[in-house]
Amino acid sequence: MKSAYKTLSTQVYQLDKPIGKSFGDIEFYQQVLSSVKGKVLEPACGNGRILVPIFNAGIDIEGFDLSEDMLKTLTSYIEDHKLALNVWHDDMTTFQTNHQYEAIVLPAGSFMLLNTENLAKKALNRFYEVLHPGGKLFIDIYLSGGLQIGDTDVRTFRVDDATTINLKMVVKDYDDKENVFTSEHVYKQYTNDILRESEREVFPLKFYTLDTFKTLLSCSGFSNIITHKNYGKDVHKQPAMYTFEASKSY
């Protein structure tokens, strides 16, 4: 799996979604994990937006990410705040750990970066392997919300008084076999209106229906599958975010 977050995209993510910024997900995960007695894992933990608040709530959690730039941002925060929080560089499909976990959480659609069913199955099988019997898996996915090739979004992020980063996102391709929309993200950093740096990323997202994702979980051995819509808050919000909760059999 290829990392989707490089230097400028990580900087934009940090400006747009800093540690502790919640979309209802932080409160949701703090609640569902509050009764967990053992260790929790967050694959694809990114800049620690959710990982750090959960850790600070007293939950024994650790995480990893494939993006080295994201991890640099996170480890810098951990060191600055003197947190005993373990994070490392790894891949969702092949990660290595010496622990068994009571829960694994993948908030905010990060699982959708696995852009083939084969990769998704590998990750789910690996999650199943490292869960204790009876352990819980929580995965957020959202529905496509009518994405189409050519859809374009342009945003500007202010770094400081002199510097901005412009981001243009264009949906470029759709793979109907894998149900994957691929976007091109172009970042341009300007200082005093002079272009200083640019960066291009290809950003695939694999979408599922509720039924296909339940089937995928079942095929990996998970049972007692239930869903939570939009973290139990605004159930009419679109595109809807669904949290799948599933258990490893005893």
Image (cartoon, grey):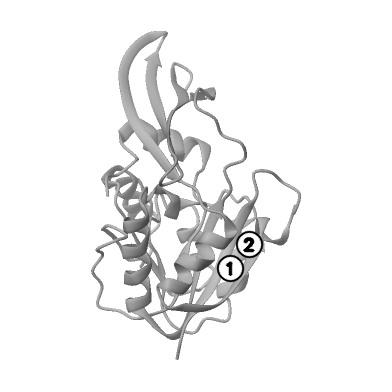
Residue 101, percent across and down? Answer: 39, 79
Q: Is residue 52 visible?
A: yes
Q: Mark 2 highlights which residue?
A: 27
Q: Residues within 10 Å of mark 1 (few under 14, many from 20)?
A: some
| Tag 2–tag 1 contact (CB < 8 Å) | yes
Instruction: Give the image location of residue 16, x and y in percent.
Output: 52, 37
Three-letter amino acid code at disc 1? Gln
Q: Residue furthest front?
A: 177
Q: Which mark is residue 118?
A: none
Q: Is residue 159 visible?
A: no
In this rendering, the answer to whether 97 lies above or below 119 is below
Q: Quadrant of residue 189?
A: top left
Q: Nearer the viewer, residue 177 or 75?
A: 177
Q: Residue beneath label 1, please? A: 30
Residue drawn at x 48%, y 19% as measured from the top left = 161
Give the answer, above or below, for where 192 lies relative to 202: above
How far apart, in angstroms, are the residues tagged by discs 2 and 1?
A: 5 Å
Q: Regarding mark 2 in the picture, which secondary structure is present there?
A: helix
In the picture shown, does residue 139 fall above or below 9?
A: below
Q: Is residue 128 above or below residue 186?
A: below
